Amino acid sequence: MKLAEVQTILRSEVLCGLENLNREIVTACGADLMSDVLVYTKERTLLLTGLTNIQVVRTAEVGDLMGIIFVRGKRPGPEVIEMAKAKGIPLMITELSMFDTCGMLHSRGIRGCSERVTPDEL
C-alpha cells in the first residue's frame, strides 16, 4: 500500500514529504518506545506513534522507515518537522487513536511488525 492511500484511509494531514507519498509500505509498527521500533521493524515499515520528539525522526532514519504518522492529533514542533524534511521522511497527523489507526490499516492488509512477511511481499 502506498503512503498516499494510507493518508486517505486515516484522513491524515501531511506535514512534510508530500513528494514521497508514493512509497510502498508492507508493515506498520505502532509504538511509543523507540527501542522497540528498532528491534521489531522490518523493511518498508510505517511508524505510528504518539511521541512527537526529535528522537522519533532519528529512529525512523536509523531504522530506514518509510514515514511517521502521529496519532491522536499530536503535532510535533518545528524542529522535528525540519529534521524530517532534511532526512526525506514523510510526516502525517491523524486524529485517530493508536488502536483505531492500527486496526484500520490491518483490516486493509498492512501487517504488524511481529507478523511474518515473506521476501516476495517486500
Image (cartoon, rainbow, N blue to C red):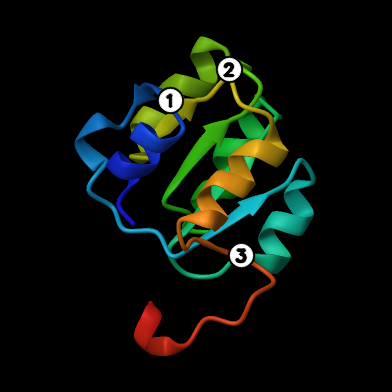
Q: Amino acid at mark 3?
A: Thr
Q: Please determine whether, in this image, residue 62 is positioned above or below residue 91.
A: below
**Count of picture labels:** 3
Query: Residue 21, image x and y in percent?
Result: 27, 41
Q: Residue at x 48, y 54 (%)?
A: 65
Query: Residue 105, image x and y in percent?
Result: 51, 50
Closer mark to the observer between disc 1 and disc 2: 1
Q: Amino acid at mark 1?
A: Ser
**Location of mark 1 (residue):** 12
- Count residues near mark 1 (Cα–Cα under 10 Å), then give few for <14, some for 14-19, many for 20+: many
Split into 4 quadrants, where in the image is the N terminus? Answer: bottom left
Q: Residue at x 45, y 56 (%)?
A: 108
**Location of mark 2 (residue):** 76
Query: Residue 71, image x and y in percent?
Result: 62, 28
**Location of mark 3 (residue):** 41
Q: Nearer the viewer, residue 24 or 5?
A: 5
Q: Earlier in the sequence, mark 3 or mark 2?
A: 3
Q: Nearer the viewer, residue 99 or 29?
A: 99
Question: Is there a contact, CB below 8 Å, between mark 1 and mark 3?
Answer: no
Split into 4 quadrants, where in the image is the C terminus? Answer: bottom left
* Gap in angstroms between the C-alphas marked 1 and 2: 14 Å
- Count residues near mark 2 (Cα–Cα under 10 Å), then give few for <14, some for 14-19, many for 20+: some
Query: Residue 113, image x and y in percent?
Result: 63, 66
**Element type at mark 2:** loop
The reply to whether residue 62 is in sight is no
Q: Residue at x 33, y 39 (%)?
A: 88
